Image (cartoon, grey):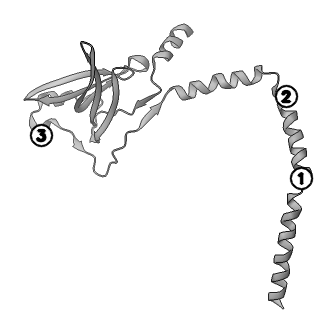
Amino acid sequence: MDIIKSIEHEQLKNKIPELKVGNTVKVHVRIKEGNKERIQVFEGIIIKVQGGGVNQTFTVRKTSYGVGVEKTFLVHSPLVEKVELVRVGKARRAKLYYLRDRVGKAAKTKEKIGARIEDREITIKEDLAEEPAVEEAPEEAPAIETENVAVQETVDTVTEEPVEEVKEVEEPKKAEEDKKAE
């Protein structure tokens, strides 16, 4: 089971966009035609978000020339360049299938008034990357020597006398304050 999780972990993106049902988004998709690659933008309303992990998908719906078009994208797919938030929609359902039956302006969700349009991203791999760093620290034997070196450095800094120079600077200030008081 660890083998499967490790393989899936390699396929995950570091940061994924925060996807909410009802939001209008622009999905930048990499398309390969022959030898050329280009990026095509698909703008529409997110009608559902499914699954989790590597298999997490979201479906975007738009009306093109009077015909409804739905595309399902894998969140962690290398073909999905980025997802831009255009409009924050107000949805009280997890799946907005009822938009399929609607035509024109009725096929849109209401906009949340006063909502900020921010492209928020969720970090996934950062938490898991910190754990191996913690495992490496106890394995290293020179860590004890490094601590001794740090102690010696602190002893060296204590023997330096820039502190006295600061006291000398403070004494003339006190003398000036005494003169002002008289």
Q: Which amino acid lies under the numbered mark 1 shown in the image of this protein?
A: Glu
User: 40 left or right of 19?
Assistant: left
Task: Name the residue beneath numbered marker 2.
Answer: 144
For the point 27% across and 35% down, which residue is it?
Answer: 25
User: What is the x, y in percent for residue 7?
Assistant: 50, 11
Q: Is residue 139 above or below residue 118?
A: above
Q: Which mark is residue 160?
A: 1
Within 10 angstroms of label 3, few (less than 14), some, or many (20 or more) residues? Answer: few
For the point 55% across and 29% down, which residue is it?
Answer: 126
Q: Which mark is residue 80?
A: none
Secondary structure category for the residue under label 2: helix
- Of residues 2 and 14, the one drawn nearer to the viewer in this rendering: 14
- Of residues 118 and 41, the one drawn nearer to the viewer in this rendering: 41
In primary-sequence order, the first of circles 1 and 3 is 3
User: What is the x, y in percent for residue 69?
Assistant: 16, 24
Q: Is residue 23 above or below residue 134?
A: below
Q: CA distance from mark 3 to mark 2?
A: 69 Å
User: What is the x, y in percent for residue 145?
Assistant: 86, 29
In primary-sequence order, the first of circles 3 and 2 is 3
In primary-sequence order, the first of circles 1 and 2 is 2
Mark in the foreground, 1 or 2: 1
Within 10 angstroms of label 1, few (less than 14), some, or many (20 or more) residues? Answer: few
Q: Which amino acid lies under the numbered mark 3 shown in the image of this protein?
A: Lys
Q: CA distance from mark 1 to mark 3?
A: 76 Å
